Amino acid sequence: MRAKRALQGFASIVYQEISHTRHTFKMVDTTYLKYKAMERTQRIQLLRDSIPTGASLIYRGTEGTDEVLPTMKTNRVGRKSEESRKATSHDIVSYIRDNDSRYFLSFTPCKETVKPYTVGLSLIPKIGYIFVTSFPMVYTTPQKLLLLNEKMFKRYDKRMINAMPQDDVRGYQSIVTMTENNNEITGIIGASVKDDWRSEVNKRMHSVIEVCGPGRIVSSVMSSNEPAHVRHWQNPDFSPELVSLDIVFYESPEEYEEMNAKAKDMGLIRKNERLPTLADAQVLIGQLNEWGNMYGATETIKVTSFPSRIKPGDKEALVKYLEGQIKSNPSIIPLEELRDSSHTL
């Protein structure tokens, strides 16, 4: 039986165990309500204690089985861009409010923030899932974008307010305020519809945790934001992403240069460096995949800058630079050597 499970892979095992025990057509799941008060308290505490943490780990919460089953079945985190009905847009500011882009996928670096996104927002009792996963190959950080380019966010607010009836303006929540309170990491899964930059579950997902909650309908007697632990799958083959690019978005070349200048003033990058862009990610993604199949590491290299002498999208220079970073990092080991050492043991 163990040999069979090993051959199946992590994603396949999780898919089978969830699909065999959960009725996907059921709107209500009463697991939480079946626990007695003491067991409920123990399971809430168990969840607090058992969510893995680490410098290379982030979290995504999902309600019900609508996301977890396709994720495990396809062995990829997120919906393929070609199959999504969301907008073909890289407007990150708009995405923060309306979650409407087939190229973005939201994560959080905080194990507490993820909990409400599993079952805490539901009115009725539900099950949900926490994905504990590596950083994606390409991502952006909304709070950092706000810090470096507040004008882009204020322009969005102005457009929204100008398009509103006067009576609605008073209740409008500024995107600046929303982003200040938003600690998410936004994974980028493509630059075009044909791209597929999604993470592979069997390699890059550390754990899947099934949780349950009572729903907001009973929030007067029990907290809907504190889900209880049901079961936990940990991936024995997990390896963090080797290299992750933290890129920035902007609306003009002049704006990009202003962001670089501000990043230097704030000490985020050095004098002879620049911020990574989507153009860099587009030319590097194939090489990042190749390196990910060649090397292993205990921690992801998060690339937040490139030398200023390398122009955005200069593939040859970018590859040469990153290759030097990888080969000079003593914690990075060729997978072939890791396999040989495991056979020796």
Image (cartoon, grey):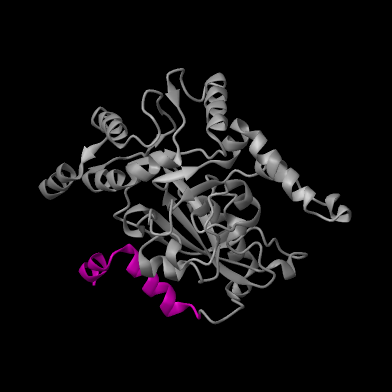
Q: Is residue 2 visible?
A: yes
* Magenta stretch bounds: 1-23
Residue 170 horizontal/vertical position (percent):
86, 49
Name the quadrant containing residue 83: bottom left
Residue 147 horizontal/vertical position (percent):
62, 32
Residue at the extreme left of the image, as rendered: 344
Residue located at (41% from left, 79% from top): 20
Query: Is 272 above or below relative to 176?
Result: above
Q: Main secondary structure of the magenta part?
A: helix
Query: Is 118 above or below relative to 344?
Result: below
Residue located at (87% from left, 53% from top): 166
Residue at the extreme top of the image, as rendered: 271
Residue located at (54% from left, 25% from top): 263
Residue at the extreme front of the image, as rendered: 253
Residue 18 lies in the magenta-colored region: yes
Q: Is residue 251 left or right of residue 80?
A: right
Query: Is 64 above or below relative to 111?
Result: below
Residue 326 lies in the magenta-colored region: no
Q: Quadrant of the N terminus?
A: bottom left
Residue 283 horizontal/vertical position (percent):
34, 43
Residue 271 horizontal/vertical position (percent):
46, 17
Near-viewer residue (265 or 316) = 316
Q: Is residue 204 left or right of residue 180?
A: left
